[in-house]
Image (tube, rainbow, N blue to C red):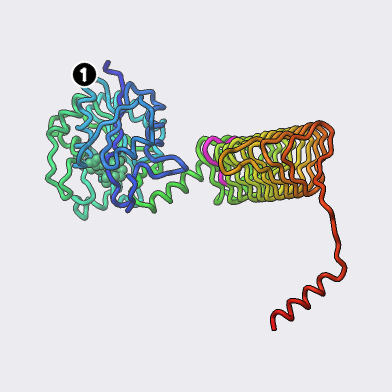
């Protein structure tokens, strides 16, 4: 079909300027590999097929997207962007539609721009349409060459450009739409007689012009979205751009960020209205924050959900954890994977939970480890309570009922089950189940020796001599 869109994403380069052992497109931006940013945009266009060109560190690059609805093509040697696209020729046999070519290192390009590019290409009936931008600092990009009347005459790469050409501020964004038959036949004619000895994809433009084909250009509205990442500095700057864009969106949606500069929200996070977020907060992955929450600051939440009106006091770390509405957590609490807290639960300072289901209104306010536990509602876990879930071989569960009072400094040795309305006396070590309504305590004699301290000190003095 003529109207079909295919996508080729270039991701075979090493990214030498990153000075990294990892392939460039696997570096993270906003917590997501660069390649995945580009791939997700491509997927948004619902193309007929997507082909990704990999080469350097191909295995690591493929791990970025372990699904099988894209085609991976190996470019054995990185002989240039034109050569890379040509490697995809066989996977586009009998494809008569248009091919959108994207760079794996241009992550912020928007779906809106790509749709506009495809639209412009079709409207002008072009053989190839390229995206351009005007930059204050065009260094490093391919420059757009035009005749005095504005007619496109070619693209020159930075290393091949004359000083005059280097002053041109219109650059190629590295995104193109081209009719498939034209693209591959043009690339077969491209030579590598340039400074870098590479087969340049942009040279398809001059091939097309020589053949009298129509080559169109479209200028991007916001040049920030076509910035490529070639260095760590560019990565950091783009991180900032992305963060500002996401933070602005949430502020526009009624979320207060006390210090937008130190609030790090990833793209897929969702936040309710009138939530107030303090400095140095990281909201990562698929985290969902309810409405009217208060996050004091220094919070680090990954793939976690908190309900409405939850208060996270200073310094809370949550990973794959869930907290229902009205809970108060922290300061200095650590909710590890599988923690699921009911409404109005209170967890205080230095409390760690893991695989813990905790019922409504239950409190554990100080210095406690709750791992592999199920706790009922309105129970109080005293300071310094430790659930011993691990014997060096296996993990065991602890069950604690409703309205239980666990005295401070108690140790519950799992597997163990405490019924409802149980009282555990302070400093008890429990190894056996306790039935509903019972008191559990250890028999231990308390002794006081008069004058012991003075005697001890005298003895120590003598032994020192
Ligand atoms: C490229 C363009 C330049 C444009 C700029 C926009 C070329 C020759 N230059 O320059 O006109 O202004 O992008 O960002 O195309 N790659 C391969 N195989 C290779 C070489 C590169 O797959 O043999 C991939 C890279 O992994 C990268 C992309 O192609 O994802 C672009 O390559 P890069 O070396 O970054 O090109 P630029 O110098 O940025
Ligand atoms: Ca680049």
For the record, the magenta segment spans: 282-288
Q: Identify the image quadrant of residue 429.
A: top right
Which residue is at the far top?
1
Q: How crowded is mark 1: few (under 14 residues within 10 Å), some or many (20 or more)?
A: few
Q: Does the magenta stretch include residue 287?
A: yes
Residue at the spot x=67%, y=38% of the render? Answer: 414
> From where the camera sits, is residue 182 visible?
yes
Q: Identify the image quadrant of residue 291.
A: top right
Name the image quarter holding the C terminus.
bottom right
Label 1 sits on residue: 94
Q: Would residue 10 appear left or right of 422 to someone viewing this image?
A: left
Query: Dot 1 lies on which element?
Result: loop
> From where the camera sits, is residue 308 visible?
no
**Front position in the image: 302 or 146:** 302
**Residue 427 at x, y = what percent?**
78, 49
**Residue 73 at x, y = what percent?**
25, 31
Residue at the spot x=51%, y=40% of the render? Answer: 266
**Front position in the image: 142 or 231:** 231
**Residue 171 at x, y = what percent?**
29, 44
Q: Would residue 104 appear left or right of 158 to someone viewing this image?
A: right
């Amino acid at each position: 079909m003529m109207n079909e869109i295919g996508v080729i994403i270039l991701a075979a380069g090493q990214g030498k300027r990153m000075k990294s052992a990892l392939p460039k497109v696997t570096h993270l931006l906003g917590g997501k590999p660069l390649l995945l940013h580009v791939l997700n945009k491509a997927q948004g266009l619902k193309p007929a097929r997507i082909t990704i060109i990999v080469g350097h560190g191909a295995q690591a690059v493929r791990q970025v997207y372990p699904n099988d609805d894209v085609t991976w093509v190996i470019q054995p040697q990185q002989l240039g962007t034109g050569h890379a696209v040509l490697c995809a020729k066989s996977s586009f046999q009998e494809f008569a539609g248009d091919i959108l070519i994207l760079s794996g290192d241009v992550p912020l390009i928007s779906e809106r721009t790509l749709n506009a590019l495809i639209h412009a290409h079709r409207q002008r009936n072009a053989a190839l349409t390229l995206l351009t931008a005007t930059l204050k600092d065009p260094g490093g990009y391919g420059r757009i060459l035009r005749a005095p009347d504005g007619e496109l005459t070619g693209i020159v790469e930075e290393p091949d450009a004359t000083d005059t050409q280097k002053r041109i501020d219109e650059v190629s964004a590295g995104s193109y739409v081209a009719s498939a038959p034209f693209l591959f036949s043009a690339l077969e004619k491209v030579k590598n007689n340039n400074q870098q000895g590479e087969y340049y994809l942009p040279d398809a433009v001059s091939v097309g012009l020589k053949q009298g084909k129509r080559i169109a250009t479209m200028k991007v509205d916001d040049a920030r979205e076509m910035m490529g990442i070639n260095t760590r500095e560019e990565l950091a700057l783009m991180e900032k751009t992305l963060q500002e864009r996401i933070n602005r969106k949430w502020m526009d949606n009624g979320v207060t960020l006390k210090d937008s500069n130190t609030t790090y929200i990833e793209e897929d996070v969702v936040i309710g209205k009138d939530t107030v977020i303090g400095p140095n907060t990281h909201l990562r992955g698929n985290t969902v924050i309810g409405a009217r929450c208060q996050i004091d600051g220094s919070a680090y939440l990954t793939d976690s959900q908190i309900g409405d009106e939850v208060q996270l006091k200073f310094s809370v770390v949550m990973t794959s954890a869930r907290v229902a509405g009205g809970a108060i957590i922290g300061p200095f609490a650590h909710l590890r994977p599988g923690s699921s807290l009911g409404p109005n639960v209170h967890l205080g300072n230095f409390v760690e939970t893991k695989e813990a289901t905790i019922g409504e209104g239950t409190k554990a306010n100080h210095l406690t480890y709750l791992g592999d536990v199920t706790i009922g509602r309105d129970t109080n876990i005293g300071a310094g309570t430790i659930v011993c879930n691990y014997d060096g071989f296996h993990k065991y569960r602890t069950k604690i009922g409703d309205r239980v009072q666990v005295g401070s400094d108690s140790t519950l040795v799992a597997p163990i089950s405490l019924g409802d309305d149980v009282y555990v006396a302070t400093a008890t070590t429990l190894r056996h189940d306790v039935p509903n309504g019972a008191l559990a305590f250890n028999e231990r004699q308390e002794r006081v020796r008069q004058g012991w301290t003075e005697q001890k000190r005298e003895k120590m003095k003598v032994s020192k001599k």
